[in-house]
Amino acid sequence: MTEKTLAIIKPDAVKKKVVGKIIQRIEGEGFEIAGLKMLHLTKEEAEGFYIVHRAKPFYASLTDFMSSGEIVVMILEGENAIEKWRKIMGVTDPALAEPGTIRHQYGFSVERNATHGSDAPQTAEWEINYFYKS
């Protein structure tokens, strides 16, 4: 099933200058990039995006991190895009991510793990609309 998902290259990966490598991997895996932009979130924008985590202990540090530098936000399209992108990213903790995944290659910690991806169709729709308002 063809679907869309949101992908974010986080500030840590932008600072490491691996944006091109990650995009090359995305294209090499057969995704179509339907939207792409670089931006710098304000603290309030990061809080809005991660609102679902507001009661969790990592919320403040996550939103601080996500507003600490440039990010690249993309809409990826493809067959089973959500599941496929999540597999390519690897699990949240880079130390536990499979070799060859983006987070294993470029991530540093659970928070500074290079990439973000939507986890479900409803989440993808909400996240895409957050950055790409219709």
Image: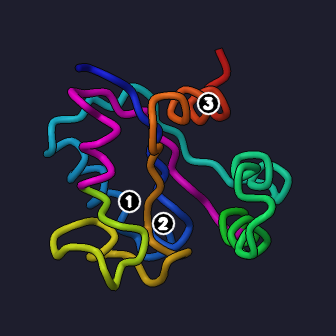
Split into 4 quadrants, where in the image is the N terminus?
Answer: top left
Split into 4 quadrants, where in the image is the C terminus?
Answer: top right
Amino acid type assigned to the residue bearing label 1 in the image:
Val
Return the residue nearer the eye: 17 or 113. 113
- Mark 2 and 1 residues: CB-CB less than 8 Å, in contact? yes
Horizontal side of 52 relative to 82 (left or right) equals: right
The residue segment tinted magenta is: 68-87
**Whole-number angstrom distance, CA of label 1 to CA of label 3:** 24 Å
Q: Position of residue 6 (x, y in %)?
A: 47, 39
Q: Read off the residue under disc 1.
A: 19
Instruction: Please check the rendered image and state whether residue 79 is part of the magenta-colored stretch, yes or no.
Output: yes
- Mark 3 and 2 residues: CB-CB less than 8 Å, in contact? no
Amino acid type assigned to the residue bearing label 3 in the image:
Trp
Instruction: Please check the rendered image and state whether residue 1 is part of the magenta-colored stretch, yes or no.
Output: no
Horizontal side of 31 relative to 43 (left or right) equals: left
Say which residue appears at 44% left-offset and 45% top-offset: 7
Amino acid type assigned to the residue bearing label 2 in the image:
Val
Q: Is residue 33 above or below residue 116?
A: above
Return the residue nearer the eye: 98 or 7. 98
Q: Read off the residue under disc 2.
A: 14
**Of marks 2 and 1, which one's residue comes earlier in the chain?**
2
Q: Position of residue 85 (x, y in %)?
A: 30, 46
* Quarter-of-image position of residue 107: bottom left
Q: Read off the residue under disc 3.
A: 126
